[in-house]
Structure formats: C-alpha cells, structure tokens
Image (cartoon, rainbow, N blue to C red):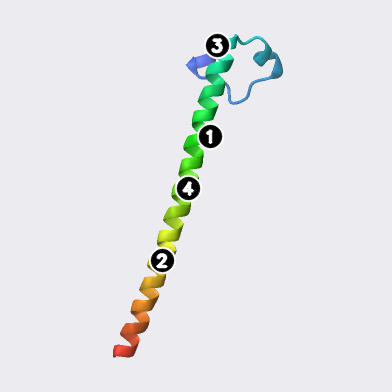
Amino acid sequence: MFTNGKPPAFYSSEQLIFMSKPELIKMYTELQDAARRYEKLLMEKKDNQERLNLLQKQVEDIEILEAFSL
C-alpha cells in the first residue's frame, strides 16, 4: 500500500475511505502514542528550562557574592 514501505505524510480523504478498519485503528493508536511522546517531551523541556533558570540565578548570586568578597 505504501511506496518504499513508508506511509505518506498526509492522507487524502479518498485514501482514508479505502483503508481497512484495522489499518485505521492502527494509525489512530500510533497517533495517540506519538501525541503522548510529544507531550512528555514538552513537559521535559519545560522542566529543563526551569532548572536552567534556577542554575542561572544561582550563578548570578555567586557572582554577586564573589564581587562583594573582593
């Protein structure tokens, strides 16, 4: 069904109409899994950004303390 064993990036409505129910269910399940992975990555990115902001604040505090200790 797919050229080169890879599905097309987008399906036309005609292609979707002629797909079997198991193919549609499989595609739906794969999309749900991809959405979960994407959401997890977004949360990890947010957590990493918060950690980075905290570390930058700590570096600034250390630089201020070092400036006063000179």
Examine the rendering and report whether any part of residue 1 can be seen.
Answer: no
Which residue corresponds to the image point at 55% horizontal and 11% vertical from the top-left? 22
Q: Amino acid at mark 2?
A: Leu
Q: Earlier in the sequence, mark 3 or mark 2?
A: 3
Q: Which residue is label 1 attached to?
A: 35
The residue positioned farthest toward the right in the image shown: 13
Where is residue 6 drawn, in percent x and y?
Answer: 50, 19
Where is residue 52 drawn, in percent x and y?
Answer: 41, 61
Where is residue 19 drawn, in percent x and y?
Answer: 62, 11
Disc 3 to disc 2, C-alpha distance: 48 Å
Q: Which residue is label 4 attached to?
A: 43
Disc 2 to disc 1, C-alpha distance: 29 Å
Where is residue 51 drawn, in percent x and y?
Answer: 40, 60
Name the disc covering residue 22, or none. Answer: 3
Q: Is residue 42 left or right of residue 60?
A: right
> Which image quarter holds the N terminus?
top right
The residue positioned farthest toward the left in the image shown: 70
- Tell whether label 1 touches label 2 (CB within 8 Å): no
> In the figure, residue 9 lies in which quadrant?
top right
- Tell whether label 1 touches label 3 (CB within 8 Å): no
Q: Amino acid at mark 1?
A: Ala
Disc 2 to disc 4, C-alpha distance: 17 Å
